[in-house]
Image (spheres, rainbow, N blue to C red):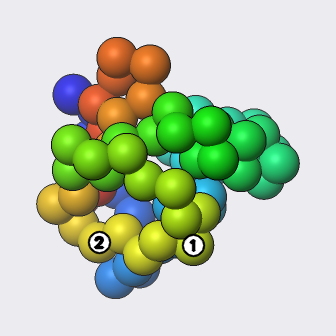
Amino acid sequence: MKEIKINTEIIKLDSFLKWAGIASIGTEAKMYIQEGQIKLNGNIELQRGKKLTKGDIIEFKGESYKII
């Protein structure tokens, strides 16, 4: 599991995907989310504006990312 440090209390899912290097641009992040490829804390997440906080776990293509 990769730990990704954020500098704010919350971060939106699409912004997190860019911050973590999962997606290089916003449209790529949007596509991953709309296609149901992103899991948040074990559940598929379809809201690109979903607010994430420290401790949340995001999964994509077999990789896990924990927000710290």
Q: Position of residue 1 (x, y in %)?
A: 21, 28
Q: Position of residue 66 (x, y in %)?
A: 25, 46
Distance Cα–Cα, label 2 vs label 1 = 13 Å
What residue is at 51 percent from the left and 33 percent from the top? Answer: 37
Label 2 or label 1, whichever lies nearer to me, is 1
Front residue (pair 23, 35): 35
Residue 15 visible in the shown view: yes
In the visual, does 34 lie left or right of 42?
right
Q: Secondary structure at mark 2?
A: strand
**Residue that lies at the very extreme toward the bottom in this rendered image:** 9
- Neighbours of disc 1 within 10 Å: few (<14), some (14-19), many (20+): few
**Residue that lies at the very extreme toward the left in this rendered image:** 55
Amino acid type of the residue tagged 1 in the rendering = Gly
In the rendered image, the quadrant that contains the C terminus is bottom left
What residue is at 43 percent from the left and 29 percent from the top? Answer: 60
Q: Secondary structure at mark 1?
A: loop
Q: Position of residue 33 (x, y in %)?
A: 59, 47
Whether 31 is drawn above or below 40: the answer is: above
Mark 2 and 1 residues: CB-CB less than 8 Å, in contact? Answer: no
What residue is at 64 percent from the left and 47 percent from the top? Answer: 34
- For disc 1, the marked residue is 49
Whether 5 is drawn above or below 59: the answer is: below
Q: In terms of image quadrants, where is residue 59?
A: top left
Find residue 68 and name its label.
none
What residue is at 44 percent from the left and 19 percent from the top? Answer: 61
Whether 5 is drawn above or below 50: the answer is: above
In the visual, does 3 lie left or right of 60?
left
Residue 7 visible in the shown view: no
- For disc 2, the marked residue is 53
Whether 37 is drawn above or below 66: the answer is: above
Amino acid type of the residue tagged 2 in the rendering = Thr
